[in-house]
Image (spheres, grey):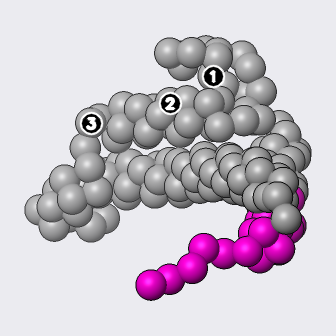
């Protein structure tokens, strides 16, 4: 038969939970601020053809996500709706020195640039999510730890 933990053991676990929660919350908030400052430093503005936040600076998860969606759509329109695979297949069927090959290479470069920009923005969106998770987990640990610290002797 097992015994219940003592009040002092619960208070120790509560203290550890408070410390870990504070660390998680501070780290999450700090990461959020760093990502925001880095996005602000880029001075990106959501373009007018965005479904939301047109003209707003990219400085948070929502505006970064919308900007990534707009870049994807613009890159696809610029490539005539073609994908990398479509362009590669088309390049195999044309003379490498032709004007069509040059246009296909330009479309491929535009798609690559768009993919790179989208990846960077989506990474910032992911960083915001992880930061929010860390703050939330920290908050939970702080609440749980404070309750454990109140254990009666």
Which residues, given as a range, are shown in magenta?
Answer: 1-25
Q: Is residue 120 left or right of residue 22?
A: left
Most prominent secondary structure in the magenta stretch?
helix
Viewer-closest of 129 and 8:
8
| Residue appearing at x 83%, y 74% in the figure | 8
Q: Which mark is residue 47?
A: 1
Q: Is residue 34 left or right of residue 138?
A: right
Q: Could you tell me which secondary element the residue under label 3 belongs to?
A: loop
Q: Using a 10 Å C-alpha cutoff, classify the residue at mark 1 as few (fewer than 14 neighbours), some (14 to 19) or many (20 or more).
A: some
- Give the residue number, with chain letter if any, for mark 2: 70
Q: Marks 3 and 1: CB-CB under 8 Å? A: no
Q: Marks 2 and 1: CB-CB under 8 Å? A: yes
**Is residue 3 located in the magenta-colored stretch of the structure?**
yes
Q: Could you tell me which secondary element the residue under label 2 belongs to?
A: helix
Query: Quarter of the image holding residue 127?
Result: bottom right
Q: Position of residue 101 (x, y in %)?
A: 29, 57
**Sequence-wise, which precedes: disc 3 or disc 1?**
1
Q: Using a 10 Å C-alpha cutoff, classify the residue at mark 3 as few (fewer than 14 neighbours), some (14 to 19) or many (20 or more).
A: few
In this view, the mark in front (2 or 3): 2
**Sequence-wise, which precedes: disc 2 or disc 3?**
2
- Give the residue number, with chain letter if any, for mark 3: 81
Q: How many marks?
A: 3
**Sequence-wise, which precedes: disc 2 or disc 1?**
1
Q: Is residue 64 above or below residue 55?
A: below
Task: Report the Cα–Cα distance between label 2 and label 3.
Answer: 14 Å
Q: Using a 10 Å C-alpha cutoff, classify the residue at mark 2 as few (fewer than 14 neighbours), some (14 to 19) or many (20 or more).
A: many
**Is residue 91 located in the magenta-colored stretch of the structure?**
no
Residue 68 appears anywhere in the view? yes
| Residue appearing at x 56%, y 36% in the figure | 65
Viewer-closest of 7 and 140:
7
Q: Is residue 78 above or below residue 141?
A: above
| Residue appearing at x 81%, y 44% in the figure | 36
């Amino acid at each position: 038969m097992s015994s219940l933990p003592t009040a002092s053991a619960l208070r120790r676990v509560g203290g550890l939970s408070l410390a870990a929660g504070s660390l998680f919350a501070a780290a999450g908030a700090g990461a959020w601020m760093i990502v925001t400052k880095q996005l602000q430093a880029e001075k990106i503005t959501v373009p007018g053809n965005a479904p939301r936040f047109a003209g707003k600076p990219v400085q948070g998860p929502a505006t970064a996500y919308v900007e990534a969606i707009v870049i994807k759509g613009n890159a696809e329109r610029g490539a005539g709706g073609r994908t990398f695979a479509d362009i590669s297949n088309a390049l195999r069927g044309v003379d490498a020195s032709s004007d069509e090959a040059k246009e296909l290479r330009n479309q491929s470069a535009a798609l690559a640039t768009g993919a790179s920009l989208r990846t960077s923005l989506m990474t910032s969106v992911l960083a915001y999510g992880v930061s929010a998770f860390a703050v939330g987990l920290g908050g939970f640990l702080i609440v749980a730890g404070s309750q454990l610290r109140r254990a009666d002797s």
